[in-house]
Image: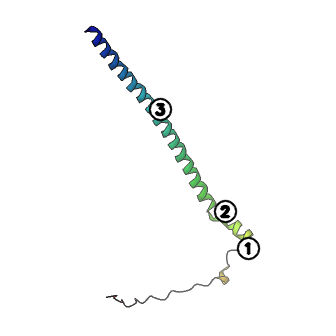
């Protein structure tokens, strides 16, 4: 009878220890994933800043002038076109 109680106690404590070990292991994996997520978020912010910098006019203007032979037009080279007001077209029912 006492042996049966001892075996039950050993099994119960073994289960508790196994559950705690698994919990610690999952916590380590979770912390590792959080670190990776934080690193990827920081990298994304850095890349977004690089894209903003590379898409700026100060960066693109010299490239356009050198490679594409483009320049900012002078005032006498600009033509402003006015838009005609759009007249709504009559509706055609398909039925």
**Which residue in the structure is indicated by mark 1?**
69
Q: Secondary structure at mark 1?
A: loop
Q: Are marks 3 and 1 in contact (CB under 8 Å)?
A: no
Q: Could you say where residue 4 lies in the image, as x and y percent from the top left?
A: 28, 12
Is 67 on the left-hand or right-hand side of 94? right
Nearer-N-terminus badge (3/1):
3
Residue located 73% across and 73% down the image: 69
Residue located 58% across and 84% down the image: 80
Q: Is 84 rendered above or below residue 70?
A: below
Quadrant containing the C terminus in the rendered view: bottom left
Residue located 72% across and 72% down the image: 68
**Which residue in the structure is indicated by mark 3?**
28
Q: Could you say where residue 82 lies in the image, as x and y percent from the top left?
A: 53, 86
Label 1 crowd (10 A; few <14 / some 14-19 / many >=20):
few
Q: Could you say where residue 92 lies in the image, as x and y percent from the top left?
A: 36, 90
**Which residue in the structure is indicated by mark 2?**
59
Mark 1 and mark 2: Cα distance apart in space:
15 Å
Is 88 on the left-hand or right-hand side of 74? left
Nearer-N-terminus badge (1/2):
2
Mark 3 and mark 1: Cα distance apart in space:
57 Å
Quadrant containing the N terminus in the rendered view: top left
Quarter residue 3 falls in:
top left
């Amino acid at each position: 009878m006492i042996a049966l109680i001892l075996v039950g106690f050993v099994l119960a404590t073994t289960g508790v220890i196994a559950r705690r070990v698994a919990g610690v292991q999952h916590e380590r994996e979770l912390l590792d994933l959080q670190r990776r997520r934080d690193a990827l978020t920081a990298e994304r912010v850095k890349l977004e800043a690089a894209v903003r910098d590379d898409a700026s006019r100060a960066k693109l203007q010299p490239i356009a002038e050198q490679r594409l032979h483009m320049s900012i037009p002078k005032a006498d080279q600009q033509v402003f076109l006015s838009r005609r007001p759009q007249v709504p077209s009559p509706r055609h029912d398909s039925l």
